């Protein structure tokens, strides 16, 4: 088959291999050495704007679906697809919110904390940024059956792109047993995806979906698919756009399978190479303490990108240790309950280029940060709040200064996981114990408990009067 776009190709990430493939191939791993693939562009032969502000011209062209999309309005920065093949459902209508109340909790000066709210995507999480790009590639290669393993959001996004488009895509999703928040499971079921629940966790499901995709020739939609990461680069373009093209000091992102952090790093590598930014933000990738492979490998064992030749023996030894101890990932932030992140190597590249740091935060820190995002921001699901908890931790350590501009990525919508939220705030002790207590989470002072009041007018009025005197419902009285 002819190469569809010769100015874009796929290349093995392994410097000792560097095998290349055309963009018309669907490989998901280097056919020679099995390493990750990257999408690479011959920028010298591509029309790229000379200034990022030139993208603003797309704002006046919103009737064109490619300019309306918050991904494809930056299409010159992910130019692997012929425009007539692009699959879009209007993703990327997201916003950057300055959140001073949450900023105060984090320890930042007013105006310094920004929340990039990706919950506004059609499926309610950042995944749509990647799905639109991967579905475009799937269409280019003539794929019909598409599959993923998921902690919930990837599968929800995949199901949406199958159901909301008319190219005949069929969704097959793999989930672990009891490992998926109800909001996300509801989406997969409602959008008609074949939902295969296996006994095991995300890492087990990931292993299986790769085998199945390989055996049956099904198109793989997990973030080992390098085209997905092309779409996820645009989260950074929209952050820059919202900051009038001025890079922030920090980007803080939760780390699960490490697709986002990898994509963000690639975005900045390319923008710098193209001379479109002169300053690169620092990157902080935040693990949950119960799924802390990246933090262990980087912060404890000193794993680095090493000019493209990271010591993967360290990783192999770490995974052998996990196997020997039978340790499984476990966190209330189920979206990032992952012990074997598939994009580890690309994430190391991002950390290297963006002078990055990695931290882990406890379920308690995550749930407390989430409550603050709810009380002073647009709300988010537990995994997303790891970014805010991580920023707070880095502030306390003095690594982030109070006057620095910090963008925390809120990766998923608040309503994705109502169980965790209601348990944290709720009055029902039994439910709290079941969902959070067993993980050592306490309800903090700012949990907003429902008030049980008799169905009596005077009692109700007295309760409202009490509430009005004591400040707002989350207990703060500023
Ligand atoms: N936040 C949310 C809400 C997620 O759903 C995920 C990943 C992450 C953060 C982590 O992002 O993998 O790029 O490091 N969810 C995947 C899923 C694994 O299956 O939905 P990452």
Image: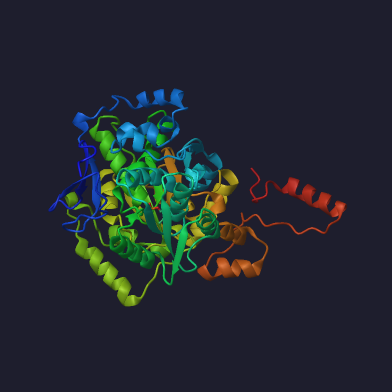
| Residue for point 43% across, 55% down | 171
171 relative position to 262: left or right: right
| Residue for point 45% across, 49% down | 162
Q: Quadrant of residue 220?
A: bottom left
Image location of residue 453, percent across then percent down: 79, 58
Residue 88 seen from this side: yes
Query: In which of the image's four quarters is ligand 1 placed?
Result: bottom left
Image location of residue 121, percent across then percent down: 49, 43
Farthest residue in the left direction?
Answer: 16
465 relative position to 14: left or right: right
117 relative position to 306: left or right: right
Task: Work out whether residue 464 or residue 38 is closer to the camera in this orientation and state it.
Answer: 38
Image location of residue 61, percent across then percent down: 44, 24
| Residue for point 37% across, 62% down | 292
What sort of colour scheme is used for the picture? Answer: rainbow
* Image quadrant containing the N terminus: top left
Q: Quadrant of residue 212?
A: bottom left
On screen, residue 83 above or below 425: above
Count of labels shown?
A: 0
Task: Work out whether residue 274 or residue 115 is closer to the camera in this orientation and state it.
Answer: 274
Q: Quadrant of residue 302?
A: bottom left
On screen, residue 48 above or below 391: above
Residue 150 seen from this side: no
* Image quadrant containing the C terminus: top right
Image location of residue 262, percent across then percent down: 31, 48
């Amino acid at each position: 088959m002819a190469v569809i776009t010769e100015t874009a190709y796929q290349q093995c990430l392994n410097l000792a291999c560097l095998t290349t493939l055309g963009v018309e191939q669907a490989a998901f791993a280097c056919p020679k050495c099995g390493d990750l693939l990257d999408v690479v562009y011959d920028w010298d032969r591509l029309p790229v704007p000379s200034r990022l502000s030139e993208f603003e011209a797309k704002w006046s062209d919103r009737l064109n679906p490619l300019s309306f999309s918050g991904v494809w309005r930056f299409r010159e920065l992910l130019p692997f697809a012929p425009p007539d093949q692009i699959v879009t459902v209007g993703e990327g209508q997201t916003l950057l919110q300055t959140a001073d109340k949450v900023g105060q909790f984090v320890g930042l000066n007013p105006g310094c904390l920004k929340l990039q709210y990706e919950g506004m995507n059609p499926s309610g999480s950042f995944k749509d940024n990647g799905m639109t790009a991967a579905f475009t590639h799937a269409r280019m290669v003539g794929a019909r059956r598409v599959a993923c393993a998921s902690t919930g959001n990837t599968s929800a996004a995949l199901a949406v792109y199958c159901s909301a488009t008319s190219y005949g895509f069929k969704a097959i999703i793999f989930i672990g047993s009891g490992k998926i928040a109800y909001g996300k499971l509801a989406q997969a079921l409602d959008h008609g995806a074949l939902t295969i629940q296996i006994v095991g966790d995300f890492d087990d499901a990931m292993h299986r979906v790769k085998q199945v995709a390989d055996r049956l020739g099904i198109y793989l939609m997990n973030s080992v698919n390098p085209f997905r990461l092309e779409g996820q680069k645009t989260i950074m373009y929209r952050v820059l756009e919202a900051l009038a093209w001025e890079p922030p000091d920090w980007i803080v992102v939760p780390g699960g399978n490490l697709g986002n952090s990898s994509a963000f790093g690639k975005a900045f590598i390319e923008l710098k190479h193209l001379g479109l930014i002169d300053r690169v933000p620092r990157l902080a990738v935040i693990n949950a303490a119960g799924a802390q492979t990246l933090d262990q490998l980087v912060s404890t064992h000193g794993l680095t990108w090493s000019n493209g030749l990271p010591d993967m023996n360290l990783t192999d030894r770490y995974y052998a240790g996990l196997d020997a101890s039978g340790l499984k990932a476990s966190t209330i932030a189920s979206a990032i309950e992952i012990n074997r992140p598939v994009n580890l190597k690309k994430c190391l590249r991002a950390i290297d280029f963006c002078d990055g740091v990695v931290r882990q935060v406890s379920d308690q820190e995550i749930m407390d940060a989430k409550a603050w995002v709810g009380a002073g921001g647009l709300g988010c699901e537990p995994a997303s709040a790891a970014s805010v908890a991580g920023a707070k931790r880095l502030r306390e350590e003095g690594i982030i200064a109070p006057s620095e501009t910090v963008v925390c990525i809120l990766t998923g919508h608040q309503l994705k996981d109502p169980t965790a939220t209601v348990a944290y705030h709720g009055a029902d002790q039994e439910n709290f114990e079941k969902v959070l207590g067993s993980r050592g989470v306490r309800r903090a002072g700012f949990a907003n408990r429902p008030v049980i009041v008799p169905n009596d007018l005077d009692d109700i009025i007295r309760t409202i009067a009490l509430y009005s005197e004591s400040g707002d419902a989350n207990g703060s009285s500023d």
